[in-house]
Image: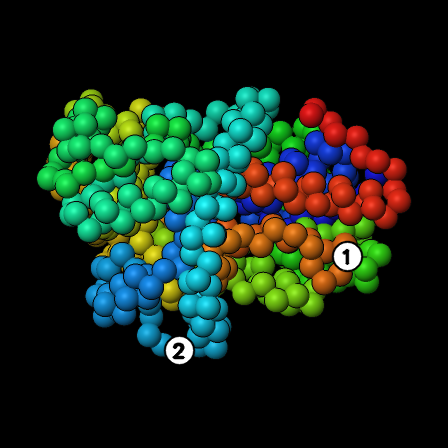
Amino acid sequence: MKSIAVIGGGITGVTTAYALVKRGFAVTLFEKHRYAAMETSFANGGQLSASNAEVWTHWSTILKGLKWMLKSDAPLLVNPKPSWHKLSWFAEFISNIPQYRQNTVETARMAVAAREHLFAWAAAEGVDFDLKKEGILHIYRDKKGFEHAGEVSKLLAAGGLPRRAVTPAEMRAIEPTLAGSYYGGYYTESDATGDIHKFTVGLSEAIERLGVRCLYGQDVLALHSDTDTASVVVGNSGSGTVQQTHRFDSIIVCAGVNSRAFAAQLGDRVNIYPVKGYSITVSLQDKQSQQAAPTVSLLDDETKLVTSRLGIDRFRVAGTAEFNGYNKDIRADRIRPLIDWVNQCFPDVNTRQVVPWAGLRPMMPNMMPRVGRGRCPNVFYNTGHGHLGWTLSAVTADMIAGVVAQTYDRRGYAPLQIQGA
């Protein structure tokens, strides 16, 4: 039985560990926090949204970024202070604009496949995560945005995802609580929502039952590979200089925005940039608010905000993109637009009790996750999912586990038995 180290206990690391242990590997998962899913997998928008597969590598993104650069509450905010990391990332981002169509189609294809894995895993392991299969409604306030969505729909269809245009009257029938005036919308009935934190925690408990060794409170200080063996040097969080070295046959880096630094230690370049996103969780404490909050998930294309209804008494609103380095500060001027949006679109929802949050999305310049081998034959990556980590997690976990299994088969080891397949 080959031993694999998984670095990172967020949605990507936990799903990767699950896919590996089901294939018969001996898996050890390292996470710096005391619990799983305490960073970017804690309070995201909640959408399992194949309909949001459009990549950002489009000239309109650049133009909007320049337009909004000095507007503190803009949906896309770029700190003008230069850094080599930021400049190199944007240079690669621009170079990937010609692959916009191809990458959008491929992302949609992966997102559709991911659903089957995620729903099956949750059912097999009894994970409750407030799953709601009510679809996702994209809303547009003007003709230009609606027509662009029509072009995007063609790309999504090429990736295997059907969605349909709806009139303002049909929008009101789909989600009666939505207030305001709209030009039209697009509705994807097959999309869903759920609580990423609850799912990741539930699956982390499942992998321990299946035999994965989960080491929490472990700061990974260094990674090393000599092609045949791999080592993980850790220190216990809060315990000063105490260090320990663990040895494995292979390493898989699933460390979100920290993957770039780990990759450099392993001789690889994984140019992830941390793109901050914000969310608010509105507590629906009274019956009026519970009835006034939407049950269908929404994506407002103009404000770049998404919503999810999590159970009876929680309403999640998330979005915006902030290029400001490794900074997780929660800014009031970035949270205020989210609350104002709720007040405008759902005026009968009481926003007296709102919990703000910010997380760093690990984004690659081409907006595609890095899934595959590194320079060393026993180093692998499953990282860089950007704003679609929740949506794509199950399929990329299955993909990387398949790559690892094929790698060892080709080296002449005994064929791996697929457990539970």
Numbered disc total? 2
Please provide percent x and percent y for residue 298. 28, 37
Please tell me the numbered disc located at residue 377: 1
Q: Nearer the viewer, residue 187 or 264?
A: 187
Across and down, in percent, residue 43 comes to 40, 43
User: What amino acid type should be assigned to the residue bearing mark 1?
Assistant: Pro
Label 1, label 2: how far apart the Cα atoms are: 35 Å
Structural crowding at the residue carrying mark 1, measured as other residues with C-alpha within 10 Å and reported as few (<14), some (14–19) or many (≥20): some
**Camera-nearest residue between 23 and 32:** 23
Q: Secondary structure at mark 1?
A: loop
Residues 394 and 247: in front is 394
Looking at the rendered structure, which numbered label has been put on residue 82? 2
Callout 2: SS:
loop
For badge 2, the amino acid type reads Pro
The residue depicted at 62 percent of the width and 29 percent of the height is 206
Other residues around mark 2 within 10 Å, as few (<14) / some (14–19) / many (≥20)? few
